[in-house]
Image: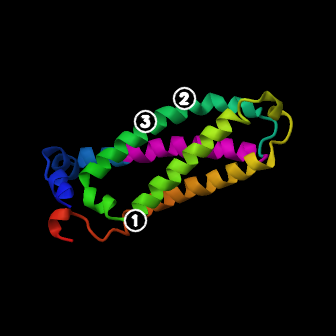
Amino acid sequence: MDYLLWLEDTPFSIWIRESGPAFFGSLILHSVAMGFVVGVHVAMNLRILGMAPGIPLSLMRRFFPVFWVGLVFVSLSGVLLLIAYPAKALTNPVFYLKLSAIVIALFITRSLAKGVLQDPSYDAEPVPRKARMLAALSLFLWAGAVTSGRFLAYTYKILMASHGF
């Protein structure tokens, strides 16, 4: 736990934690970017599940640049929030649940992008059952990631490593 003590005592961590604009700016950026990342996935997964059948499924790939930019910003802002309160996140199992849900959901996205989103034949016909199951699982995982992210504000046992374990 010495690493957590060291990290929270760095000038950068102190600045993020104690500067209203830095901390709340990171929090706002994280929330907005997360909205874009999750929003792209919700739209794509709902389309795979059969919603809005008039929209060609292959067109969903056009939203991927929004997803990638959002992912960069949500990752950077997430790292800033982690640096502000490292013990709060890194000692909380809910944080690892959130990260696990995101990683699994991103692997599902990769699978769907290489499969049904690249095949224009699925623009007009139903997608395979496996793809629909993956889309439903992805929706569940993104909802879990967002929910567990919110729970991080309430489920920590240690806010600061310097305040003791």
Looking at the rendered image, the disc whose residue lies closer to the viewer, 2 or 1, is 1
> Which label is found at residue 93?
1
The amino acid type found where label 2 is placed reads: Pro
In the picture as drawn, the residue positioned furthest to the right comes out as: 125
Q: Secondary structure at mark 2?
A: helix
First of labels 3, 1 by sequence position: 3
| Quarter of the view holding residue 55 | top right
Q: Position of residue 36 (x, y in %)?
A: 52, 41
Q: Write down the residue under mark 3.
A: 72
Separation of residues labelled 2 and 1 (CA atoms):
31 Å
Which residue occupies 73% across, 43% down? 47
Q: Amino acid at mark 3?
A: Val
Please give the name of the residue rendered at 51% of the width and 48% of the height, measured from the top-left corner.
103
Work out how far the residue at label 2 is from the one at label 3, CA to CA, in angstroms.
11 Å
- Mark 1 nearby-residue class (10 Å; few <14, some 14–19, many ≥20): few
Dominant SS of magenta comes to helix
Which residue is painted at 36% across and 63% down in the image? 153
For this view, does 41 lie left or right of residue 13? Answer: right
Neighbours of disc 3 within 10 Å: few (<14), some (14-19), many (20+)? few
Q: Which residue is mark 2?
A: 65
Position above or below: 158 against 128 = below
Residue range (magenta): 28-50
